[in-house]
Image (spheres, grey):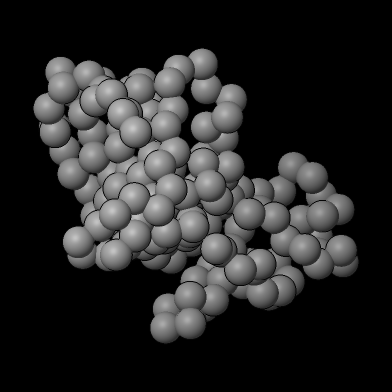
Amino acid sequence: MNIDSIQNGVVIDHITAGRGMRIYTLLGLDELDCSVALIKNAVSSKMGKKDILKIDAEIPISLDVIGYVDPGATVNIIQDGKLAEKRSIEKPARLVNVIRCKNPRCISMVEQELDQVFLLTDRASETYRCLYCEAKAPENG
């Protein structure tokens, strides 16, 4: 398999194997008009297997989305074919409009203009709860 290097764009690396598609979907990468490569189950000496996303465009990336799905991932900014910046990702304390509350009685389901806000209530178990009704967020994987 041959995936070309990118000149200017973003590489999301060290994604836990199997989580790349979830990041792809939540970031809305299917709507981009540029080359996007999703490499699943790539061999990794550190992780065994990993997923990688390569985006051949300089676009804003939501670190909250990546942190929610896989806080161990890294985001590499590529400029002129070289690594310009490398960011480690952590679990965000607050998610805004990343996921939706599943509680049909939640005010965020009735009041459509309200932001969907989730707070990290338990870092150890990676549990997020809705700000309005405290319903548990769906699993992130």
110 relative to 27, above or below:
below
The one nearer the camera, 30 or 106, is 30
- Describe residue 114's horizontal placement relative to residue 32 as left or right: right
- Quarter of the rendering occupied by the C terminus: bottom right
Quarter of the image with the N terminus is: top left
Q: Is residue 34 visible?
A: yes
Does residue 20 sit above or below 107 in this rendering? above
What is the residue that sits farthest to the front in this orientation? 1
Q: Give x and y (percent) for residue 32.
A: 52, 22
Q: Residue at x 35, y 56 (%)?
A: 50
Query: What x and y, as percent, mark residue 30?
Result: 58, 29
Residue at 58% x, 42% y is 25
What x and y, as percent, mark residue 41? 40, 53
Toward which corner of the image does residue 38 lie, by quadrant?
A: top left
Residue drawn 43% across and 21% down?
35
Q: Nearer the viewer, residue 69 or 136?
A: 69
Q: Is residue 67 visible?
A: no
> Picture quarter containing residue 81?
top left
Q: Residue 114, relative to residue 85: is it above or below?
A: below
Which of 80 and 107 lies nearest the eye of the viewer? Answer: 80
Q: Is residue 134 left or right of residue 52?
A: right
How many callouts does the rendering have? 0
Question: Which x, y percent locates residue 43?
Answer: 29, 54
